[in-house]
Amino acid sequence: MDRGLATEAVSASDRSTLDTLDTLDPFVQVRRHYWQALAGDSRSTRTWPRWAPGTLLAELAQSEYLTSDGSPATGSRRSDEDDHKVARMRAAIRSGTVAPPEEAVLATAGSTFLRGAAAAGWPAVVALHGERRTAAALRTALLSDRSPESLALLLDLAAQGQYRSLSTAELTPHAHSPDRRVRHAAWRALAAHAPSARSVLSHVVPTDTYEQLLLEVLLGGDAGRGVRQPMGPGTVVAQSMLLGGLDTPGEGCSGGLGVLLSGLGDALALTDQVAAVITVVTACRSDIDRDPTLLRRRAPGHWVLRLPVDSGLPPGPDEMRLHREALSWWAAHLLGSLGRPVDVLHVRYADDGSIALAEAARRIGAALVFTATPDPHRHIAERHGRGNADPASLRSDLHRVFLADCLVQRADRVLAIARRDGDTQELLRHFPQLESENVSAVPEGIAAYPRTPDELQRRRALLRHIGMPYSGVPGRPLPVLLSVGRLHPVKQQDVLVRAWVASGSHRQSHLVLIGGRPDDSEPAERLMRARIDECLAACPEAAERLHLLPALSNADVRCLERALADTGAGTRARYVCPSVKEEFGLAVLEAMDAGLVVAAPARGGIPNYLVDGDNGLLIDTSTPASLGAGLRRLLDLDDQAIDAMARRAQALVRDTYSAAAMAAALACHYVPLATARRPRTTP
């Protein structure tokens, strides 16, 4: 497949550099050797990397990547037989030697991760062994005694291929099952039996708005309440954000991606040859109860499509696998009902939701674009290689690594997030299968800030909202440290507060944290607030200077940042990003664009545009002590240094990291893929 346009494949010298770097990370090393062996590379070796023996990571990695038959490693103590079944299936999918359908259906009765591997590899099973044999294997499995989880998955696999593995009469009892998963999967499977299925479904009484909407679509009603919309000529692009809300950054799972896709979708719709942009999000049952409309226009040429999710609350990363098949069905049906075929579907996160959309893209004939990032790859050995790994967390991380490999296999084009020098070596270290491909790097960007006629009034109101402090040295207020982001352990606001207090920075500054819901509905947010309260309990002085506020809209955040960057406000504000790492850091870019001097983590993607001491500070955020040292550096900057850094940062963002520039670069990938779009099938 044509993977990209700009970046050349890895040279011999680059491979030598990568080989040297790989010895520093055993997980990178074992993956590199695995892919070299699959490619028949003579440099491949089965030498076991140097990491702590007897760890669960060592056992699982050996089973998945080094042991040819996926059997338990010698002396295995911590893993179990199901782990090795998962390993065998993942290895087979990576190598293209998937099991026959009679064996593949057995995996649907296994663990969560075994079912996940079976679902991800199912299209390859069908392609290799044929639809007739696959449908027969599904029928045999469906007629056997199955758990609700296994039965629902089998029914959805039948619906995925529109197989009539069971007759209408055989599906009817499942259509009235007390288990929602089974019931809904049976309804979707009945769609292949039209018109006889209508007599079954028309007698089903929905129990809530979600079921009413699903039945309405299956019975041929309005295809998703206003989904068909007129579009002009050109490429139709869909982009996804299934975690969090598009318009609620800083709440729950909502973060910078929503801000990115909002601005990018608007900008893409204005580029030549792009007819429309569809941003795909999710809507849980409570969302649908409030508003059952599934498609709304956001801006000229930019639409938001909501995929219904049978969940009382918005699904988090760990819940997405529970809704994978249903999401795939909804996406294929709704994207296939727009009145114009979707030409390109772009996913950016390695999880079960992206796998669901990849399958939907295959079914509707849309080209698939995947932005690959080395997450969680780059932290596997560090987090899990010392013998104290949390087994559930490790298995989840390995599952995401596998899903990323599946997305690379399926993608018509793989993109990287651009580094300052255009280098893609870090990505290739963690995705060695891409070394022989052309992988292009696309810079991310932010939308231009829209000033409003009431700008000054808004700034004053926002400063009052955060309780803008004016106490400290007579005639000169204390500096303000601002940090914006969802309230979550990965963002480390609790570590920031500990560092702020322990370093004595609380005596010289006020700390403003913006993020989280206004209520306590999110467990992760409750945990973070409890940790912050615990830190402040012993330091009343710090408690008086900490301002913890719920999330603001992106427009208000950007307006507030400009108010704080204005020297006429009487203070020198600084921006702090305390995350362990950021893949790119849209919030950091927005602070730089506003004219704030920033301090951000040295790990992750931010060093690709932030140069320490030139246009900001790169700090070590791995411990409270190192983060505290970074805060001291930030507070010790004089006005001249702040002005110079902020000026250079602002110029860089506006020249290089705009949503318009990102849209133009992506259009150069989307349009050729649309021209060669695969034949469209019925969703």
Image: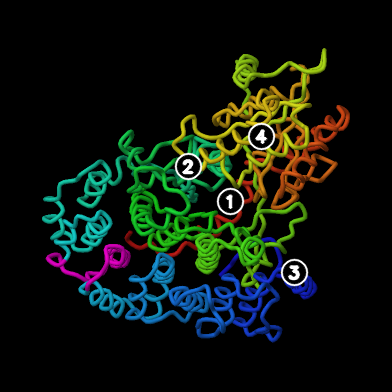
State how far apart marks 1 and 4 are (Cα): 33 Å
* Residue type highlighted by circle 1: Ala
Q: Which residue is mark 4?
A: 483
Residue 593 at x, y = what percent?
A: 71, 34
| Horizontal arrangement in the rendering, residue 383 relative to residue 225 (left or right) | right
Q: Mark 2 vs mark 4: which is more N-terminal?
A: 4
Q: Which residue is mark 3?
A: 24
Pick the quarter of the image with the N terminus.
Answer: bottom right
Circles 1, 2 touching at the beta carbon (< 8 Å): no
Residue 469 found in image quarter: top right
Circles 2, 4 touching at the beta carbon (< 8 Å): no
Dot 1 falls on a residue whose secondary structure is helix
Residue 330 at x, y = what percent?
A: 34, 53
State how far apart marks 2 and 4 are (Cα): 21 Å
> Which one is in front in this view, the residue at disc 1 or the one at disc 4?
4
Q: Mark 1 vs mark 4: which is more N-terminal?
A: 4
| Horizontal arrangement in the rendering, residue 73 relative to residue 149 (left or right) | right
State how far apart marks 4 and 3 are (Cα): 33 Å
Q: Which labelled disc corresponds to residue 667?
A: 1
* Residue numbers of the magenta segment: 145-170
| Horizontal arrangement in the rendering, residue 556 relative to residue 570 (left or right) | left
| Helix, strand or loop: magenta stretch | helix
Taking the spot 71% from the left edge, 26% from the top edge, the residue there is 510
